[in-house]
Image (spheres, rainbow, N blue to C red):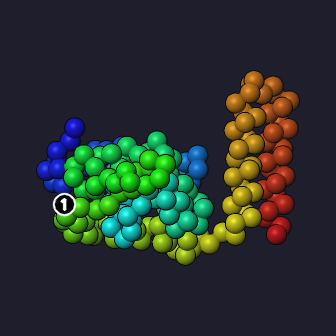
Amino acid sequence: MRSFKHFLHGHPRGDHGDGLAGGRGGGGSGRIFGHGGLRFVLLQLIADKPSHGYELIKSIEDRLGGRYSPSPGIVYPTLTLLEETGCVSVDLADAGGRKRYSITEAGREFLAANREITDEMMARMKGGVDGAGPRHGRPPQVVRAIENLKLAMRMRLAREPLTEQQAHEFAAVLDSAAQQLERI
């Protein structure tokens, strides 16, 4: 278990592995929060409004215009770390036994001590929706189509290896699509 002192005074981006790759499936768009940045975002969101883990995931997804949704496998361990270090408290009074996270005084001190980093992380999410960030204002139907193409390519390439003929056909489809897009 990490101590609050380590959490508060360690490297600002910490050694907790919650640096998130941009977009679903990652790949080329850079990190949204950077190594350890998710804890600042989660803590700020909890400071703004006590929330359940699922609500926090949806809030991040909404703020990023659907471009990225952090996985529960990243969010819940980070929330546990925040709890263990005393930055948040957990209320189990909710029907269904869901944990509701609230910021503690130690959490407020952590945010105050790291205001610049927290503001940077929150601005990255705002930029993702406003077009100033990684999404660049792409229409949702274009984002969806890009994701569909990437998924189709990954699924096909995950099957048996392409024959020489299939590799030429695969490349021809992509080249044709690129040429059509250049004409738009």
Name the quadrant of the N terminus: top left
In the depicted structure, whether residue 151 falls above or below residue 37: above
Task: Check disc 1: other Cα within 10 Å, few if <14, some if 14-19, many if 20+.
Answer: some
The quarter of the picture where the C terminus appears is bottom right
Res 137 → quadrant = bottom right
Q: Tell me where residue 152 appears, x and y as whole percent.
A: 75, 42
| x and y, in percent, of residue 26 in the image | 55, 48
Of 77 and 94, nearer the camera is 94
In this rendering, position of residue 149 left or right of residue 41: right
Q: Nearer the viewer, residue 22 or 90?
A: 90
Q: For the point 55% across and 56% down, which residue is it?
A: 68
- Residue at image point 23% right, 66% down: 108
Residue 127 coordinates in the image, percent (x, y):
49, 71
Q: Is residue 52 left or right of residue 103?
A: right
Q: Quadrant of residue 165?
A: top right
- Looking at the image, which is closer to me, 166 or 141? 141
Q: Secondary structure at mark 1?
A: helix
The answer to whether residue 21 shows anywhere in this view is no
Location of mark 1 (residue): 106
